[in-house]
Amino acid sequence: MRTRASAVTKSLLLLAALLLPPAAGAAAPAIKAPQVDTPKRILFVGNSYLYYGDSLHNHVGRLAVAGNPSLAKALQYKSATIGGANLAHHNIEYLTEPGRIGVKEPFELVILQDGSAAPLSEERRALSMEKIREYSEIIRKRGGQVALYMNHVYVPPHKQAKPENIRLTEAHYLAAGNAVKALIIPVGLAFEEAYRRRPDIKLHKDFDGTHPELIGTYLAACVVYASVYGKSPVGNAYDYYGRISKEDAAFLQQVAEDTVKKFFGR
């Protein structure tokens, strides 16, 4: 009986999060289109959210090649991730210096992903904003552009799962992205939309309510691809070599497309 009550409570909490409306007067992204035409050298900087499910950068690269086979030998993606990290834990000077991590020319685009709790308190937001400003300046001095990866948020059973987290996360990344004129990648909003359309879908690991399941990583990759390349993922043949069902792939591609179009007003 207690287990059933707990399950009902978790479902109600998730439903409340899905139905919570965007903040009134929420800002719009200042950068609405990719700042690099067909980027080939991309660095992903973040934590375990990026390396779960065979690493986000691998999926984005495969989507890009499936959409444009001529990129197969041209892409140079790198992923620098530290478990449980926030941006302050990364040595961005070292990572972006040409040749340091195996890419001789400067990265054309660096995608920054801060910790999942970064938007959830005033102190953490201030630190996140400070590092995003600092790192953006370094990246641009090296000749690259900056994109910010808007995280998905916690769901039950995570102890910090709260309905307002997605609005705090959205507001923080909009503020930070607009402040440094970076492209904002709305992954968190895509997760929210997928759950709204299919409340039974499992985008998070059910044991912790924070890390992405494989299909969560796939959805994130579709959002990154659509945002960074300005291309629709709908109809893309990449399905992780048949490990993602055609039905799920089609659903997640459409959610990514709709989210990106709405967010950027494309």
Image (tube, helix red, strand yellow):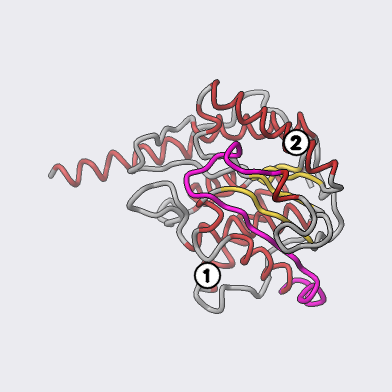
Residue located at (63% from left, 23% from top):
24
Q: Which residue is mark 2?
A: 29
Q: Is residue 241 above or below residue 233?
A: below
- Occupied quadrant, residue 78: bottom right
Between discs 1 and 2, the one toward the N terminus: 2
Q: Which residue is mark 1?
A: 247
Mark 2, Cα crowd under 10 Å, few <14 / some 14-19 / many 20+, is many
Could you tell me residue 90's position as x and y percent?
61, 43
Amino acid type, label 2: Pro
Q: Which residues are magenta?
A: 66-92
Q: Nearer the viewer, residue 26 or 50?
A: 50
Amino acid type, label 1: Glu
Residue located at (75% from left, 36% from top):
29
Residue furthest left as drawn: 1
The N terminus - image quarter:
top left
Q: Which mark is residue 1?
A: none
Answer left or right for 258 relative to 179. Answer: left
Q: Is residue 192 magenta?
A: no
Could you tell me residue 145's position as x and y percent?
81, 46
Could you tell me residue 103's position as x and y percent?
76, 62
Q: Nearer the viewer, residue 59 or 103?
A: 103
Answer left or right for 168 relative to 133. Answer: left
Residue furthest top as drawn: 122
Could you tell me residue 57's position as x and y percent?
64, 61
Residue located at (68% from left, 33% from top):
174
Mark 1, Cα crowd under 10 Å, few <14 / some 14-19 / many 20+, is few
Look at the numbered disc 2 and give the secondary structure of its residue: loop
Q: Is residue 67 magenta?
A: yes
